[in-house]
Structures are given as structure tokens and as C-alpha cells.
Image (cartoon, helix red, strand yellow):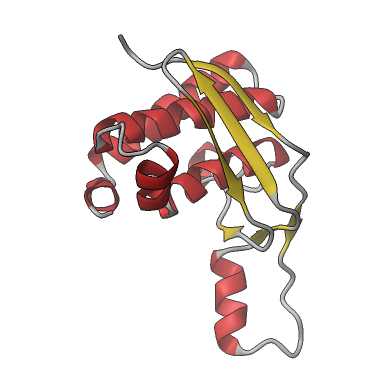
Amino acid sequence: MKEQIISVNFDKHPIVKDRVIDFDDTDAIKKEKKIFPFKLHNDVILTIETNMRKFAFKIPAKYIWNGADIPRALWGLVGSRTDNAFLIASMVHDYMLQFKKYIMQDVLNGALSMAEYRRLTSLIFREVLKHTGTGTVKANIMSGCVDIFQKYFNKKQWNRT
């Protein structure tokens, strides 16, 4: 039986802000803000219920990420990487990728293989997209593209723990 998402809920609405480059920022900080232009300004707890388990984890305030990795050529069709509807979903997905070892071992108690976890992150991405106002068809297409990219083109990230 494949794992299916029943619900994805935040304990409070995530507050996301742009990281503005300041005059007195060092070159390293300016570079970091260009690469990771978004910052979470409040702690949020994400609770996920599937047909097989229920779990939760906190995404801490000050978490930074790059937004949705949508190729520029598709922005007119899909939306840009900075579209508000995609920011929360990309934050959750990026956090789950960046901290997969913690989530897999400490939150999920080692219950999933790496392939199962990768698939789960794509399903959660889809549900958060829908939760933030993206239509079902578009959310399915976007999460399918993310899953294919992660499976075939981002293998190194999924082989590392």
C-alpha cells in the first residue's frame, strides 16, 4: 500500500519575508541573500497525517531558503519562483531535504527508506501547494516534476544523509 496524505496543517500561518540586501552587508552576506532570498520569521509546526502515520516537526524562525526552483522559461506558464503560493511549499520541501537525516531518524524513527522519504516529500509539497491556493491540477503537475527531478537529476542529495 502506497502512503497517501490525509492532511497537512501548520500550527500557525508561516510568515515569510524577503531578505533585503543592506548597504552595510558584507559581500558574503550579500551573496547569501541572493542565493537564499527568503526567511521564515516565526516558528511553525507542521503536522502531517497519512494513511500510515501521523508526525510533526518544527521549522524554526530564521530558516532561509531559495524559493521554488522553477525554470525561468516556465514562469509565464507556471509562475515565478517568488510566487507567494509556492514559497511555503518550497520552504517545507527544502527543509525536509536539508534536514532529512533528522526527520527520517528522529521524527519518523527510521520507518522509511530513502526512496519512500523522497516520495513523501513530493506528496507533502503537493498538499502544501494546494493548502496555499494552488489548484489541484497545477499542484499535481508541479509535485510530479519535483519528484522526477529529485529522483533522476538530484540523486546525490538523496544518497547523502
Q: x, y percentage for residue 23?
A: 76, 87
Q: x, y percentage for residue 154?
A: 28, 47
Residue extending furthest toward the top: 1
Q: On the picture, is 131 further left or further right than 112?
A: right
Please determine whether, in this image, residue 129 is positioned above or below residue 95: above
Quadrant of the image occupied by residue 88: top right
User: Between 58 and 68, which is closer to the camera in this rendering?
Assistant: 58
- Rendered-image quadrant of the C terminus: bottom left
Q: x, y percentage for residue 118?
A: 34, 35
- Rendered-image quadrant of the N terminus: top left
Q: On the picture, is 96 further left or further right than 10?
A: left
> How many numbered badges does the structure rendering display?
0
Q: Residue at x 36, y 42 (%)?
A: 104
User: Between 158 and 110, which is closer to the camera in this rendering?
Assistant: 110
Q: Residue at x 55, y 27 (%)?
A: 48
Q: x, y percentage for residue 109?
A: 36, 38
Please determine whether, in this image, residue 119 is positioned above or below residue 3: below
Q: Visible in this render: residue 74? A: yes
Q: Residue at x 77, y 49 (%)?
A: 15
Q: On the picture, is 127 further left or further right than 96?
A: right
Quadrant of the image occupied by residue 56: top right
Q: Visible in this render: residue 77? A: no
